Amino acid sequence: MFLKRLELQGFKSFADKTSLDLNGRVISIVGPNGSGKSNVTDALRWILGERDAKNLRSSRAEDLIFAGTQTKPRAGLAQVTLFFDNSTGFFPVDYNEVSVSRRVSRDGTTQVFLNKSEVRLKDIIDFFAKSRLGARGLTAVNQGESDIFIRSLPLERRAMIEEILGLKEFRIKKADAERRLKNSEANLEKACALIEEIKPHLNFLRRQVTRYNNREEILQSLRDLENRFYGSQIKTINEDLRKTEAETRSVENEISLKKDEESAAGRELERVKTSEPEAAEAIKKIRQEKNNLLVKRGNLQRDLGKLEAKIEFAGEKAGIDPVRLLEIIDEIKKLIGESLEETDIVRIKLLLSRIAGLLKQTDGGEKKNVPDISAERKNLLRETEDLEKEIERLTTEEDVLNIGIRDFNDRFSKAFTKFEEKKRETESFIQRLNHLLLQKEKLDFRLREIEREVSESGRDPRTINASADELPIDERETAKRQIMRFRQELASIGDVDQGTVKEAEETESRYSFLTAQTEDLLKSISDLKELIADLDGKIHDNFVTAFKSISDEFDKFIKIMFDGGNGRLILEKIDAVPQENGSEENAQKAQGVEVEINLPKKRIKNLEVLSGGEKSLVSIAALFALVSVSPPPFLVMDEIDATLDERNARRLGEMIKRFAGKTQFVIVTHNRAVMEVADILYGVTMTPDGTSRILSLKLSPEGGVPEAPEPDIRS
């Protein structure tokens, strides 16, 4: 057996927990009208995944919950659980028993459980579809739908056949693939539109970022070149500063030493000075007098100049030989010049004597009435004699005094010479120090100028790497021009806008995402189209293969049901009729199932001329034609014999009995002939409190359906 047990609690009229043992090949459910027996088939249809409340004889999901009576309070939820025997591995799960539960609460919440694990309703529908079961079609025929196959549309008939054949799984997969294909195509269209929308802006941002990236390269090249250009200079200046500072310290030390030596020499000179004899004062006076003589000598020179002109003029008038006169004048000029350059008193005296002798040679002028020249000559002679006397006196005194101070002069000269020598040495080092300080100042100035230039370029001088590769001096001018060119390029690019960079990164990321998504969607669309084509092929091949056999079996059962006649199922193309969960394009290619029958003693032009009973018999013939080709594990029938007379009801019973070895039947019936073939008979009655109650009766093999071998339900 496939169905094991059905449990109901709070479902419609079954307020209390109710369990039905389904371990039989044919289970019949009987009871008076209104007792709630059809609620059992509604429960089975609901557990198989029915979504539409109308197909469960309700207007909304809450109507499935026991509404309560005057003596029985309403239930808070409805739950149905169906247990299956999976010992043959019919369901693809590792359980010998499979249970499916469905629960609905008054707030509209629906829960579905597979072996007590909550799953989605869609998962259960797919689970049953893989096992050739479903809530629609012929697996569960509701009350009043015994002629469902006849009054269904051609495409609906095809769907019923596909469900029995187990092709609904492929239909669900195809519908899901078509839905995903439609979504993928819509998403692809959106992605392409977004790509086209952002691509121009992205190209602009890419150009900007490329410029910024070039800016970084240029900036790095500039930094490297600045490090070499300025770093080389800074390094050279720092080295020169270190040398200058070291030499300055050395010179300062030398100056200190030389000043000490100079001070010592100065003290020695002062000591010698203090030991100077009194004659030194006299010598000072003599020296002063010598200075006076020099002054007089200058005066004498001026007077001689005047006399020269007068003598020349007077000589011309007195008849003195002009040539001789000029010779005398030239010689006087020469002697005056020598006397001006001479410092020795004795030599000066001799020169003055010679000048006086030359002046006497001009006496001829006096005899020729030149009294002014004579007077001047006499004055000059007198002055000359005075100078000679003074010179004699100074010479005598100096000779006397020099004898006493010669030793002092030697000592003073040596002390003075040493003092002057130390002084010159000190001054020499001071000059060297001043030169070094000036050089250091120049170096500091150059260093500050370099730092200022670096700062004006927008860079911190402290970041200059003075240890970079040194730039040769002959390359510095070229490097300076290159630095200017780099700076101009950076100025033209401008500062990096981090907002633009971030926007470019985000836009690039979005573009990459959309591009990848587009590629994924294109692949997905291709895969889905391939899957749809593959599923179409499977559905078509399996359907066409089985359809011929189903049509042949349908013809056999028509003959049985109507004691003759014939029937067949025909595939016809259905134009412009959309399929459920399919596109119009697929609908135009679909083939529906048409029914064609010929009955004895009755001419049939269309199925509408059939009576209700005849329609039921045709539908029953189609149902058992399907069962004979692809037997489902179970069928649920709710009063499909209602329109049949007793003769045809017995035929129905015989057919149920014939196929009970392969398919399990759950039948709601009022017909005695159908009851007789049941293994288990459940009676449903309405209790005084308004709830349904189950009474069970197991029939013996002699009184019911004979024992049959366990069917291989996997076939």
Image: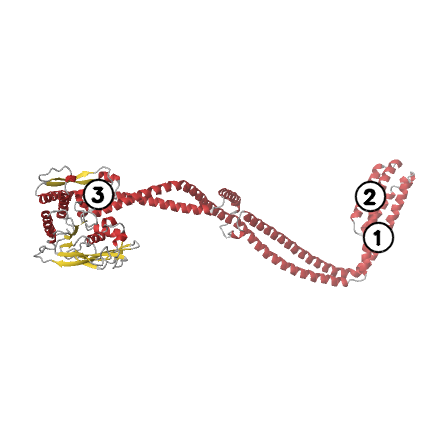
**To which residue does mark 2 refer?**
332
The percent position of residue 562, horizontal first and vertical second, equals 9, 43
Name the side, left or right, on which 204 lies relative to 640.
right
Position in image of residue 83 (x %, y %): 20, 57
Q: Amino acid at mark 2?
A: Ile
> Is 280 rendered above or below residue 388?
below
Instruction: Say the numbered circle drawn on residue 536.
Output: 3
Q: Position of residue 90 (x, y in %)?
A: 18, 54
Write down the residue under mark 1: 391
Q: For the image shown, how many numbered marks are present on the structure?
A: 3
- Residue depicted at 17% across the width and 44% down the height: 149
Callout 3 crowding tier (Cα within 10 Å): few <14, some 14–19, many ≥20: some
- Which of the two labelled residues, at mark 1 and mark 3, occupies the earlier sequence position? 1
- Mark 1 Cα shell of 10 Å, populated few (<14), some (14-19), many (≥20): many
Considering only order in the chain, which callout, 2 or 3, is on the residue closer to the N terminus?
Answer: 2
Q: Is residue 409 left or right of residue 35?
A: right
**Disc 1 from disc 2: Cα separation:** 20 Å
Q: Nearer the viewer, residue 569 or 290?
A: 569
Gap between marks 3 and 2 measured at Cα: 151 Å
Amino acid at circle 1: Ile
Name the residue nearer the viewer: 689 or 463.
689
For mark 2, give the secondary structure.
helix
- Amino acid under disc 3: Asp
Write down the quadrant of residue 434 in the picture. bottom right
Colouring chosen for the image of the structure? secondary structure
